């Protein structure tokens, strides 16, 4: 989505953060050493998710919403759904849908707090870069998506078939999902 199209759909507060001039990475972030993660075991290093789950069914790539999430993630405290709902940060959604979205975005980006801090400071990025970052974080947070985008899609491309039909995806999911 282009910056112009995103600015028409994004709430005002987040739109200002997305389209403002590039901000220098804060010295505290640049010079600070980070260890641990937001996971219960804070001594563990951030790592990719290895357990199968169904979050991708309720929260896909979410490029526009991810950018808003990055812009609004300014502290160790998670974004409160009620505050985001009242502020209209994520557009016109029900409070329950917003809670679901925030839960999924926290799982996707909160596991990598250093990256989330950098994304918060990186206020001016191109659309292709934004898509790529969303894709990488979805790969990190979803083992099934990682297998899909790391095996099925490259294999099809090597076979000279750069497209995938819905039925092929369903068949692949049936085989790869272990009967789930």
Image: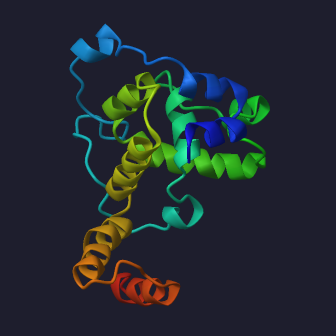
Vertical placement of 177 versus 138: above or below?
below
Residue 23: name its quadrant.
top left
**Where is residue 140 shown, x and y percent of the image?**
32, 54
* Residue at 28%, 53% in the rendered image: 48
Q: Nearer the viewer, residue 129 or 31?
A: 129
Asked if residue 93 can be seen in this view, the reply is: yes
* Residue at 44%, 67% in the rendered image: 53
* Residue at 38%, 86% in the rendered image: 172
Asked if residue 180 can be seen in this view, the reply is: no
**Where is residue 100 shown, x and y percent of the image?**
63, 52
Q: Nearer the viewer, residue 19 or 134?
A: 19
**Where is residue 142 shown, x and y percent of the image?**
38, 61
Vertical placement of 25 versus 123: above or below?
above
Vertical placement of 57 versus 26: above or below?
below
On-image quarter of the C terminus: bottom left
Q: Nearer the viewer, residue 24 or 177?
A: 24
Residue 113: name its quadrant.
top left
* Residue at 53%, 60% in the rendered image: 60
Q: How is the image coloured?
A: rainbow
- Residue reaching furthest to the top: 27
**Where is residue 134 shown, x and y percent of the image?**
42, 49
Q: Taking 7 as reference, is 174 left or right?
A: left
């Amino acid at each position: 989505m282009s910056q112009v199209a995103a600015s028409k759909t994004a709430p005002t507060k987040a739109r200002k953060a997305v389209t403002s001039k590039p901000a220098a990475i804060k010295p505290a972030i640049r010079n600070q050493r980070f260890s641990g993660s937001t996971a219960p075991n804070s001594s563990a290093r951030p790592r990719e998710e290895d357990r199968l789950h169904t979050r991708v069914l309720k929260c896909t790539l979410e490029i526009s919403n991810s950018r808003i999430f990055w812009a609004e993630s300014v502290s160790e405290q998670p974004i409160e759904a009620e505050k985001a709902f009242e502020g209209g940060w994520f557009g016109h959604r029900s409070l329950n849908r917003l809670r679901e979205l925030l839960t999924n975005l926290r799982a996707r980006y909160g596991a990598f707090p250093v990256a989330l801090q950098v994304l918060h400071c990186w206020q001016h990025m191109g659309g292709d870069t934004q898509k790529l970052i969303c894709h990488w974080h979805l790969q990190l947070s979803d083992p099934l998506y990682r297998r899909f985008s790391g095996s099925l899609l490259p294999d099809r491309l090597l076979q000279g078939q750069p497209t995938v039909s819905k039925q092929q995806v369903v068949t692949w999911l049936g085989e790869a999902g272990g009967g789930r």
